[in-house]
Image (tube, helix red, strand yellow):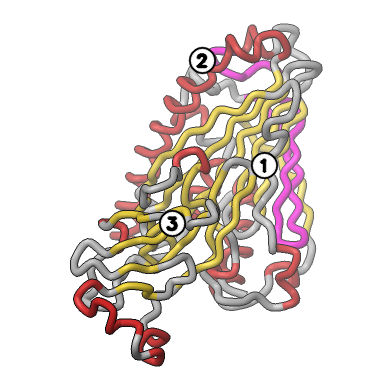
Amino acid sequence: MQFRDFWYVVAESRKLKANIILQRSVLGEWLAIFRGDDGKPVALQDRCVHRHSRLSKGKVLQGKVQCPYHGWVYDKSGKVVAVPSEGEDFFDNIKTCQARHGIVYETCESDGYVYVRLASNSSEELQSFNQPFKMPFYQEVGWETMRVINRFHNNVTNCAENFIDIPHTASVHPGVFRNQRRQKLQMTVERCNGSVIAEYRNETNNLGWFTSFLNRQGNAIIHTDSFHMPNITSVEYNLGKNRRIFITSQSVPESDETTLVYTDVTYNYGIWNKLAKPFVWWTAQYIIHQDVEALAIQWEVIQKYGTQFMNTPADTIHVFVESIRHAIAQGNDPRKLPDKSVTVNFWV
């Protein structure tokens, strides 16, 4: 197993229009993303095999991409189908035509996203990952989804850990998300089958600006955080009827030190769904920008002093996530790690 075996978001479907090319980077690989003549997304290595210009700087002509340097044309399979400087002679040498071929990657579309997978083929044990992660309640009746995209100067592991980390919220997002109240919470964390699930108890009304709207009565909150290999986090708050929200983030590794994060905030606020949308968007972006800054600072320190972190019981969820990410980095299947379940108390 390797990170290249999994699906990664490269664009929102609505933004990949005909006759445009999007430039993307996944796991250090440069990609040119466009729609072929059948309307389906295509991902080519962003490199012309001729003189190594970037295909993403070219243009799409009837579902084919033309290099901006010498005009070589590639079809959706990555094959060179025209070379202007050779004219009709290009088609005379079949072997030469077949040898001129760019690298193409597998793509698919799901829940309004375009995905790419870099591995050329997947083993039988990875068949369960042949489809991208299903986004919770996307476009279902009674639910609204708001999407934001942000770039973090940090790696996927640290981004994912941040998105499912409660203790930092009172320090990084005071007032907006939580306040420091010294409230005792309990967390049960389980690592199983390549995922980490954390269930929290004793949360009531420490929800920042929107406490009075979301949980005016101070009822117990059903709160679950999860991580799904290799890069998905999902946060669920269930505060009763028409008070439910999912924050699902897909952390896409552009390189070893930059991560592009696609976040879906999907919620059911009943009759308030439409009215709440601009407030949900603004709050999500405000909070994420604070996290972008915090993680950039963390990365500066990591670059200087390394990753010898000191953990407390409240960091158990991070330790489990790191064990899964480390297993993949070593070429192992995290689903073969022993199942573990830990219950800890911590304060916020």
Residue 205 among magenta residues: yes
Q: Residue at x 53, y 38 (%)?
A: 263
Q: Is residue 114 left or right of residue 34?
A: right
Mark 3 and mark 1 in contact? Answer it, CB < 8 Å.
no
Which of the labelled discs sits on residue 279, or is there none? Answer: 2
Residue 82 is situated, as x and y percent measured from the top left of the image, at 32, 72
Residue for point 50% across, 68% down: 105
> Which residues lie in the magenta part?
183-210
Where, quadrant-wise, is the C terminus in this rendering? top right
Residue type pointed to by label 1: Met
Q: Amino acid at mark 2?
A: Phe
Label 1, label 2: how far apart the Cα atoms are:
21 Å
| Alpha carbons under labels 3 and 1: distance apart | 29 Å
Residue appearing at x 42%, y 86% in the figure: 98
Q: Residues within 10 Å of mark 3 (few under 14, many from 20)?
A: many
The residue singled out by tag 1 in the image is 135
Secondary structure, mark 1, is loop
Foreground tag (3 vs 1):
3
Residue topped by disc 3: 63
Q: Amino acid at mark 3?
A: Gly
Secondary structure state at the residue bearing disc 2: helix
Residue at point 79%, 63% (across, down): 339
Whichever of labels 1 and 2 marks the residue nearer the N terminus, that label is 1
